Amino acid sequence: MPSGGRPRQLSVRTLLLGLLLAIGDGRCGQLTRVHRALVSLPERHKRRLGVIARWRNGDHQLTYRQIERTLKVMSKALGCRDGAPGGALSELVTSLVSASVPERYEDVSSSLAVDWTDQQSWSRPPAEPGGPCADPEASWGHRRGHAPGVSDELYFGYYLQLATMVNDTGGQEVPELVRAMLLTSCHLDPPAAFVPVLERLKASGVGIGDVLYDSGYSYRVARTWAIPLRRIGASLVTDLHPSDRGPKGTYNGAIACNGNLYCPATPKALLGIGPLARGASKDETEAHDGKVAELARYKLGRITKDDPDGYHRAACPAVQGKLRCALRPDSLSLSHAHPEVTKAPSEDPPCCCTQQSITVPPHVNVKTAQRQDYLSPEWRHSYGRRSAAERANATVKDPSSTDITRGSVRLMGQSALTIVVACAVVVRNIRIVDAFEARQAENERRQARGLGPRSRKRRRRTLEDLAS
């Protein structure tokens, strides 16, 4: 007797193509829409892809049950472990997302904006804690609430993280393509879970330069986020959490504040500078930037690069000619336009005041150190690129295109949901490339006619605009 049965009609390749077609046509990630997309293909493509197969009794067209079963078998084979995707599922997602980035854009930028968002499950939450539900892999998470007076709200599902390509500092404009993604259970810490994804991205040959993220990542323990990123060569650009701002101890007498070391005589008012208020006027911005520039005069300047162990040397600001100090007689020859230290420690001064420079170990400011001074205009301009991460989260949830919100995607289970979201990211990247190149072509046509680039429409309308 012959062993085994006949091969299954629907292959994994055809199933993934059906998901891409359904999402690309705005049909959402529902299996009924996937079936409809496949059976509506031209005859020759249906036979090539196995949508129509030759059976004993004649031609047989693919059924919905076959799609449902293939996805179930594939999800079970790929699997997840302890709320994180397994090796096979991670490799599939990486291959899909990487294939959606055209070769001409692979090396145009090394900067990434990282953010996480909510991804609800189609399942209802359990009626009681620990009770049964249709999606046992999902768990309770929290997201930012949009209702008046609500800062956070609970949802039942997963955390979705995306790493979006942005232009390098001073570099050319690039399409904001998603380079990596991760869907995990809500009981896992998102930043710590995303580190292996960025490490695999680096190992695959993708250069990682600036990594931009908000305070939801920055306040994590350094060994689970900041240290691993620095180890792979990333330059961190982040908004500090309120608990990490301001003076945080000293090292060899120098004050550790906002990722830098400052002179012990730095005025407390300067060390307490906070972020610029949203919607600040031009005068307020200039006053704020003036204080930040004044604070920079008291900063110990880095005079060497990090050695293989992460150590570097930093020099006193008076030695570098940024301020006047009685402990540094040569600095007194500077003009009085420079700030002067009037209360220098005369008895038993610390090392930073007696030595020309000090050695700074890697554990000092390991979580908060950045290339630009925190709150400076250069930092604001660099950190402003992080809005690309917000746009990436918004476009994959756009109801008019790749909508992956609850109801549009009626699937349960981490593996199945990861596959659908990865296909949505692929479709989103293709659309971003098309829109970017169309905009570039339009700008070139306008330039040939002597016109400037088309300006973006202003979306924010204030009360003054409505009243005028």
Image (cartoon, helix red, strand yellow):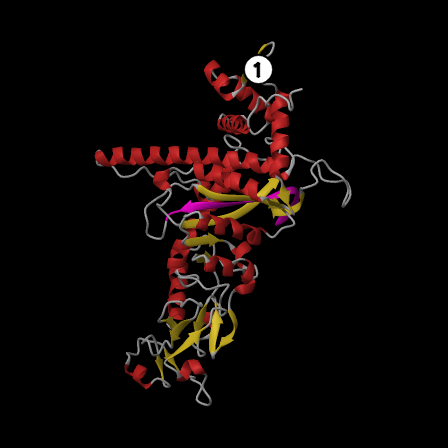
Residue farthest toward the top in the current orientation of the protein: 57
Does residue 132 appear to the left or right of 266 in the view shown? right
Q: In this view, does 47 lie above or below 412?
A: above
Residue at point 56% right, 64% down? 243
Residue at point 60% right, 32% down? 409
Residue at point 63% right, 31% down? 73
Q: Position of residue 344 (x, y in %)?
A: 42, 84
Kindly identify the amino acid type of the residue bearing the numbered disc 1. Gln
Does residue 7 appear to the left or right of 277 in the view shown? right
Q: Where is residue 437 in the image (x, y as percent from the top left)?
A: 34, 35
Residue farthest toward the front in the current orientation of the protein: 1
Q: Where is residue 145 in the image (x, y as percent from the top left)?
A: 61, 45
Q: Is residue 22 visible?
A: yes
Pick the residue in front: 342 or 287.
342
Residue at point 60% right, 53% down? 189
Q: Where is residue 188 in the image (x, y as percent from the top left)?
A: 62, 51
Q: Crowdedness of circle 1 by 10 Å Cα count: few (<14), some, many (20+)?
A: some
Does residue 54 appear to the left or right of 65 in the view shown? left
- Residue position marked by numbered label 1 in the rendering: 61
Q: Residues in magenta?
A: 146-167
Does residue 447 appear to the left or right of 421 in the view shown? left
Tell me the quadrant of the picture where the N terminus can be found.
Answer: top right
Tell me the quadrant of the picture where the C terminus can be found.
Answer: top left
Residue 260 inside the magenta-drawn segment: no
Residue 163 inside the magenta-drawn segment: yes
